[in-house]
Image: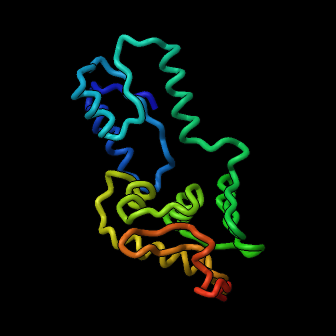
Amino acid sequence: MVLDWMLPTLSGIEVCRRIRRKPDAQPLPIVMLTARGEEADRVRGLDGGADDYVVKPFSPAELLARIRAILRRMRPALGDEVLNYDDLRMDLAAHKVTRGEAPVHLGPTEFRLLRHLMEHPGRVFSREQLLDSVWGPDIFIESRTVDVHVRRLRQALNADRRPDLIRTVRSAGYALDSSAGIDRQGRRLR
């Protein structure tokens, strides 16, 4: 979306904020294209949820290049429509998850949470980081909500008593880690 700051009824910043508040909405790249070029305006635009900020007068070629760059970052390449980790497979186009050969039934929030963890395997994310990445930066909910959704995700992934793939790091957060289902002697937990 290319959005001007100065619109007839709402400001472009307010439109941007409203779009970003919808946690279940598909990711929508937003470029602010406006005559307001002061540093404070650019900061407000980016903090309001814009992915990029272009000041008028502008070069159409540069605007298109910026849009292409945002789309490359936001949209997975065709070959990346399937994420794999251990025996877990996520088909982004079909919106399906399997573990081994068994389907895993997830709600939309658990799907987004698993996707985020699968895109960054092994990395530990705090509750706050997961809230920002999965729910969105403008959502104000209790950080313990993450724990509830991680529990639901674990239940769905481990429905047939497979080893846990989500590691809890005390006082730090959660990570997708195949060693989460390993005991101290190196045996797979069943």
Q: Is residue 150 toward the left or the right of residue 89 in the image?
A: left
Position in image of residue 187 (x %, y %): 67, 86
Q: Residue at x 65, y 55 (%)?
A: 92
Q: Is residue 10 visible?
A: no
For this rendering, which residue is in front, 49 or 17?
49
Q: Is residue 121 above or below residue 26?
A: below
Q: Quadrant of residue 71?
A: top right
For this rendering, which residue is in front, 86 or 146?
86
Position in image of residue 88 (x %, y %): 69, 68
For this rendering, which residue is in front, 32 or 18?
32
> Residue furthest toward the front?
185
Q: Residue at x 38, y 55 (%)?
A: 132
Q: Is residue 70 above or below residue 126?
A: above
Quadrant where the image shows the C terminus: bottom right
Q: Is residue 103 above or below residue 10?
A: below
Q: Is residue 104 toward the left or the right of residue 167 in the image?
A: right
Position in image of residue 175 (x %, y %): 51, 67
Q: Residue at x 32, y 43 (%)?
A: 17
Position in image of residue 28 (x %, y %): 48, 41
Q: Quadrant of residue 115?
A: bottom right
